[in-house]
Amino acid sequence: MTFPLVHPVLDAALIARSYLEPTEVQSAVLQPEAEGRDLLVSARTGSGKTVAFGLAAAATLMPGGKLPQPGAPIALVIAPTRELALQVENELAWLYSDARMASCVGGMDIRREARLLQNGCHIVVGTPGRLGDHLRRGNLDLTALKVIVLDEADEMLDLGFQEELEFILQAAPTERRTLMFSATIPHDIANLARKYQRNALRIDTIDRTTPHDDIEYRAMVISGHEVEAALINTLRWYEAPGALVFCATRDATRRLHSALVQRGFSAVMLSGELSQHERTSALDALRSGRARVGVCTDVAARGLDLPALDLVVHADLPTNPETLLHRSGRTGRAGRKGVSVLLVPHSKRRRGEQVTTSARVRATWSNAPSAEEIHVKDRERLLSDPMLEAPEGQERIDAEALLAAHDPVVLAAALLRLYRRQLPPPAYVGQTYQPDAPPPPRGAREPTQGERPTYERKPYIRSAETSEGSAGGGDFVQFRIAVGRNSRADPKWIVPLLCRLGGITKRDIGTIRVFDTDTRFEISRDVSDEFTAATADLPPNEPRITQAGDGPMPARAPRPFHRKPGGPPQRKRG
């Protein structure tokens, strides 16, 4: 199928951009029954909606074959976020090369926008809040408006813009076309359409019986305390040029962003607490490739369009099917393939299955990639790396000189070291997924440290010496970590800390005894050298770990007693 002829100017622009075939939504809005009518369109994110409503409006905006002189705008496009509005403006600018454009978005100079509006334009693109401001100030004249477009209408309502939208729609002329584009048509959108559209043609290009063909869904079962490690290994496994990590809260966004940066990832954070300048800088870093990972909340990611995004990771499970599809829809756009990975703690496995089933997506369930699997993957990637192509010219002369001066194995080892230096080290994750195991019973808790990663509960040992892991058996080396009872030290979080910092498993940890100012613990002698090396040069924000010798572990001093008046003796809290 080739693009039907729309208008000479638009046809030339499409050919120049190599738009040879219309997407499904573009073809639908160009059908004869859609001409001149209001449209209510549902289409997936990244399906070419901007070009679609640009094409749909052409006959209305240029009835005589060309645009009128610039004056009061004849088209108004409303988008939920500043980033999406600016993207829409860029798309329409090349499609309507003869049109004068103006953008009205938050974070920009409102006086400059007012001057652009007063000087005359054809198409205005903006966000609901800023457009409402211009209307109230008398800067925006809608009397000549022929077409109004609501892009990502469901997201605008989710962000609380219904009052502003209705204010703008009521101020627009009644004799106009209203084009509403939305990924979903919930009850609120349907009501808005009935109120402000006339005899609208409903166009649905989403086949809800099949998942998005360009997105592969993966669900990885993990322990609750291993989200950070599983995220690190997921990013390392795919090595995507662009990835988004979704968190439920700003605190989680800050924590995971900090962990990724410390691990060596080029990552940026996107959350509502950022200033507009910080947000713009972060998005520019993602688009230019200077940053490969964006850690964000759902609200902060609204309206993002990152063309090179190949991976979406749900560090926190989506709360509903719509959120899963919105998040995942950031990848697999414009014919590119993408992967959407859900990190599913044991206790939320049933919830993960419900969300994927309700969203009608088929996810492949597995464990998170292990460090060993990632090392194998790295070796495969190195062997097929484009940098190993045959050298030419001076590069070949220099390469032959190196071969003449050094053993080939030495040169290959140097190449390996350089290659690995740029890769963040993978983390240890327990292999917890059991394909034949049933999901945990409703209300079951997440297994804690010291328990086997199944749904059977292992008793928590607590006596005069608090024990975890192997609890005293075998040959061990003693270590000391500089946190104690005064710092609320507890084996429940000390064990995963030791596993993360030392690259060990909980089975390598013996007895743990918590004292007032430090904690003594045992590490299996088989891995003690690797543990010592891994913890020798920790960042300043991590507690200091030192070796404490091979002698018997000191007995824990008894806690002092004190008596409350009229009551039995009570242990004094540390």
Image: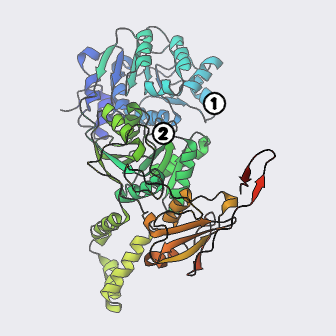
Counting from the top left corner in percent of width and height, residue 495 is at 52, 61
Callout count? 2
- Where residue 429 appears, x then y in whole percent? 41, 59
Q: Quadrant of the N terminus?
A: top left
Left or right side of 489 for 3 = left
- Which element carries disc 2, helix, strand or loop? loop
Towards the viewer: 137 or 208 = 208
Residue on which the image places disc 2: 301
Rendered-image quadrant of the C terminus: bottom right
Q: Name the disc covering residue 110, or none.
A: 1
| Alpha carbon distance from label 2 to label 1 | 24 Å
Give the image quarter of residue 331. Answer: top left
Identity of the residue drawn at 51% across and 33% down: 81
Asked whether, in this view, residue 170 is left or right of residue 40, the answer is right
- Is residue 563 in view? yes
Q: Please name the residue shown 34% across and 12% down the image.
A: 200
At 41% from the left and 22% from the top, the residue drawn is: 67
Secondary structure beneath label 1: helix
Please state which of the two labelled residues, at mark 2 or mark 1, is closer to the viewer. Answer: 2
Q: Position of residue 31 (x, y in %)?
A: 24, 20
